[in-house]
Amino acid sequence: MYSIIVIPGPTMSPAAQIHLAPGQTLRFGRGNEGDGCLRVPHAGVSRSAGEIAATGTYWSLSNLSRSSTYVVENPEGAGEHIKIAPGRLGAPVPFEFARIVLPAGSELLTLDVWAPRHDYADRNETGEPGGEPTVLPFPLDRSSRYFLVLTALCESRLRGQPYAPLPTVEQVVERLKPHWTAANRAAVQWNIDYLAVKLRLKPGPDTVDPGPRLVGKKEILVSLALRFDLVGEDDLHVLPALASPTGTAR
């Protein structure tokens, strides 16, 4: 499975995604684009501005600039961020979703990074003293928006309607609006696409080929989540309360 996936900003390389397996690196800057390098065509960016390094479960950022501090934001963290000082090498980034912000003259350029290999131990396992916790085969962060979207997709099946049609993306948006006011079609679809990577429905690190278009993506995600108990009835509490016909919550 990919360790991290880099999504260049609109002002950078036209490549849609760059996949890095554990141990691989990606250098970025104003210099020439080539193997292992992402060109950032802006006069305010150093020729060799920085380097992203992928490991098994996280990634690190090196700031090769002499004077610019880089900021790495958590887009889901209500302002949570870390600063990478000039010259800092191998700074670990703890966010599963991250946005690198590069100061470039009077502009701020961005570079998004996904880290779908973030692992979580089995929360129901007591474990033996001194032993290593068991890593879940499908690690999910239940506090994330992608889990909120997955739960909304599974809701009808979890409420005892096994043959109910899955909600459309627009219906998921409306369902989540009370908890996620910025929800829109693009954001929900983005999370569905990310879940396809997170739950290993896309090719592994042995190829950069994104593979054929995944037909019936929502149905496959829901089937997988319910088959392996990735989402259960106890998780329905993360969704906004349903309203009764009279308008009172139930």
Image (cartoon, helix red, strand yellow):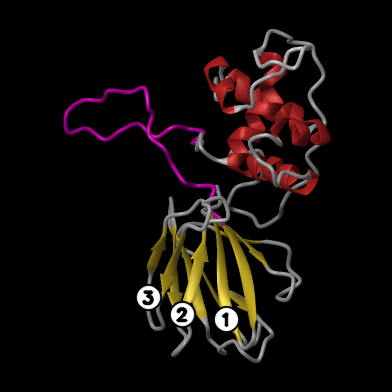
* In-front residue for pair 131/171: 171
Find numbered disc 3 in the image and state the secondary structure of the residue it sits on: loop
Q: Counting residues from the N terminus, which is met first, the one under dot 1 or under dot 3? A: 3
Would you say residue 123 sits in the magenta stretch?
yes
* In-front residue for pair 122/250: 250
* Rendered view: 62 above or below 82: below
Q: Residues within 10 Å of mark 2 (few under 14, many from 20)?
A: some
Relative to residue 49, is residue 40 drawn left or right? right
Quarter of the view holding residue 94: bottom left
- Three-letter code, disc 1: Pro
* In-front residue for pair 11/131: 11
Would you say residue 121 sits in the magenta stretch?
yes
* Rendered view: 117 above or below 123: below
- Residue for badge 2: 69
What is the magenta segment's predominant secondary structure?
loop
Q: CB of mark 2 within 8 Å of CB of mark 1?
A: yes
- Residue for badge 3: 89
Quarter of the view holding residue 196: top right
- Three-letter code, disc 3: Leu
- Residue for badge 1: 103
Residue 31 appears in the picture as rendered? no
Q: Which residues are magenta?
A: 114-139
Q: Name the residue rendered at 55%, 68% in the picture.
A: 100
Q: Counting residues from the N terminus, which is met first, the one under dot 3 or under dot 2? A: 2
Q: Name the residue rendered at 69%, 19% in the picture.
A: 242
Find numbered disc 1 in the image and state the secondary structure of the residue it sits on: strand
